[in-house]
Amino acid sequence: MTSPWTRPDAQASGTAHAPQAGRPAKAPGTAGAPRVPGVAEAAETARAPRAAGVPTAPGPAHAPEVSKSAGSPGKAVPGAVPGGNAEDPRAADGGVGGGAERTRGTGFKDPSLRRSLALFQAFLHEQEDPESCYTLLARDAADQVEAYGPVEGRVVVDVGGGSGYFTEEFRRRGAHAYLFEPDVRELGPAPAGSTVVADGYLLPLADGVADVCFSSNVLEHVADPQTFLSEMVRVTRPGGLIYVSFTNWLSPWGGHEWAPWHYLGAERARARYRRRTGRDAKHTLGENLFAVHIGSTLRQVRARDDVTVVSARSRYWPFLASAVAKTPGLREFATWNLLLILRRCPP
Ligand SMILES: C[S@@+](CC[C@H](N)C(=O)[O-])C[C@H]1O[C@@H](n2cnc3c(N)ncnc32)[C@H](O)[C@@H]1O
């Protein structure tokens, strides 16, 4: 797992899952999803060999039920935004949440300089202390989700969740959280019972079962981000929240472990990484890392009729987080990591 702020010379752990370039697009709401969401037939949809001891589906006790979510489009949702376009989460949910008021999250205001510095510090020490780094990052991301309402009792689906820090944090806050990860090498040594080995392109879930569909830093690792997004939208219930963040290609961290040399070209940057470290880089452009851009992603997401864009902002910036993501050109370099909060439209 590599954070967007991983030191360019840091060694990546594990081996990357290579997304399947050129796979056929799959429409949202596709047939083929199991009728019982999140439970059966995960084996059919899994794209990678299953780790020993890793169940293929969340435990039945917490399995989301179709009728609970998909059948109640009008039900109150975490931070449901009537009309759905509020930029201020606290305004959107009548005052629930807000970084500084939290007791179980990071306690940081978002955005704030203190928060950004703490995250940056944690990323600098990611290699020697991944536990602290990812625990903080997961708390921070869960704070961002809970700015739209509490996740307690909600179904949260973490797509491409790696070793599960985010899923674990959502569970800690009382959510029924499930990790969907295609690469068993990314999973920790003892994956939780709510772990499913599955590809984000084809989640073994029925339509509309998730209150929150969450994906952190996965979009730039898939060949077809729009299909990946469509699948996230499909499994989210009407009114539910979709959290997607990614490091865009022209970000100073766009080249991941070979950043910032990607500005000179991916091949050259990779070769430099090998010369400097004696190791092959984890990421290869066009195989498991793709040049995703902010402008085109925003245009594609805004053109969809099944989601509204609640917020598009820099995930880590200490100030002007929304403003920086609005400025064409500049945003490709200055946003660093785009956070999109989407709301699933009623059918
Ligand atoms: C940089 S890691 C991010 C892990 C974690 N979400 C985080 O933010 O720390 C990228 C993850 O995306 C996963 N991934 C790659 N292709 C995927 C796909 N098609 N569907 C779901 N996950 C995928 C990888 O296996 C890896 O765990």
Image (tube, rainbow, N blue to C red):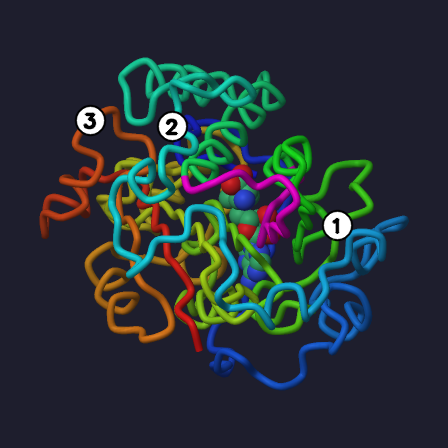
**Is 306 above or below relative to 297?**
below
| In contact (CB < 8 Å): disc 1 and disc 2 | no
What amino acid type should be assigned to the residue bearing mark 1? Thr
* Closer to the camera in the image, 136 or 171: 171
The first of marks 2 and 3 along the sequence is 2
Is 31 positioned to the left or the right of 126 in the image? right
- What residue would you read off at disc 1? 195
Between label 2 and label 3, give the one nearer the viewer: 2
The residue shown at (26%, 55%) is 85
CA gap, disc 2 and disc 3 = 15 Å
- Give the extent of the magenta segment: 148-164
153 relative to 303, above or below: above
Q: Can residue 280 be seen in this view?
A: no
Mark carried by residue 98: 2
Dot placed on the residue nearer the N-terminal end, 1 or 3: 1
For badge 2, the amino acid type reads Gly
Q: What residue type is labelled 3?
A: Phe
Callout 1–callout 3 Cβ contact below 8 Å:
no
